[in-house]
Amino acid sequence: MGNLLKKLKTKAILLAAGFGAAAAIGATFAWQTWNLNMTNVLTAHTTEVYIHDKETFNPETGDKQVWFENKGTSSVFLRISFTEFWKDEGGEGQENEETSVYLPPTVLSNTIDGQEIAIKYRGEAPDGEERWKSQWTDGAAWFDGGDGWYYYRKILKAGERTEEILTKVLFNEKLLAENPEYQKAYYQLYFKAEVVQCSDGSNTLNSAEVNADATEKLFGKTAAVGEDGISVSWQ
């Protein structure tokens, strides 16, 4: 459509020049009218963050890789949360020889006397356990909002991804052996992600105010983008 419009404009200019020259020598001419219909298709930006959960968990090696990718078309502010527990699905039990009763699911904590049964890692052992914990507390990549959410300290642009936040989960076999109620239960780790679209386009004159207002209303936290256009500070 752009090439067609350019050609039509070129023809219109040539015709106008021809009309002027003909009028100067008193010749007759005919007017020609161009009708052109144009449709402007406006495509809204999309926000879509995908939680990558690479491969099925292998209990023998403990390998489990998790990260987040922006598959939308706009830059976003990202926050995540996670929860973990052990769950015995229950089932049919035998109360006595005549009555069958249903045993409801039992939810168990992942911590016993301050020790974790399922130990999460980021990177290789032996420092992988500390790297998992420190990523939420040392300000390297995430800000602990104190509200159960962790806020990414960078703008996640379209097509980009975060660092891996999890690479391995290993089990404390000693605790499992000492606590038989866990032996029929399954460890479950859930991640949740939420995003707010970031105004980082050149057409937004008051992007700082727009971003601060949007994140405060939707996240309850105020985001400020650094001079580099990537780093984010949260309050």
Image: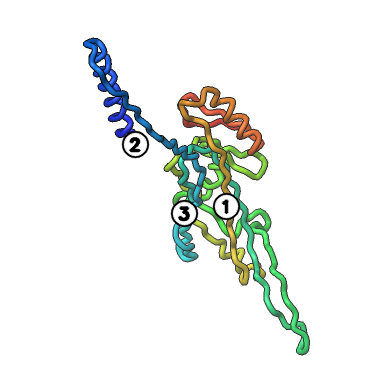
Residue 201: mark in rendering: none
Decide if residue 183 is in sight here: yes
Of discs 2 and 3, which sits in the foreground? 2
Name the residue tied to disc 2.
1
Give whichever of 11, 119 is nearer the camera. 11
Q: CA distance from mark 2 to mark 3?
A: 46 Å
155 relative to 165, above or below? above
Within 10 angstroms of label 3, few (less than 14), some, or many (20 or more) residues?
Answer: many
Marks 1 and 2 sit apart, C-alpha to C-alpha, by 46 Å
Q: Amino acid at mark 1?
A: Phe
Q: Which residue is mark 1?
A: 191
Q: Residue at x 62, y 30 (%)?
A: 213
Asked which secondary structure carries label 1, the reply is strand
Foreground of the two, 5 or 103: 5
Kindly identify the residue that appears in the image at 57 percent across and 59 percent down.
118
Mark 3 element type: strand
- 231 relative to 88, above or below: above
Horizontally, is 6 left or right of 43 in the view?
left
> Where is residue 95, by image quadrant?
bottom right
Q: Which residue matches tag 3?
A: 65
Residue 74 left/right relative to 220:
left
Residue type, numbered disc 3:
Gln
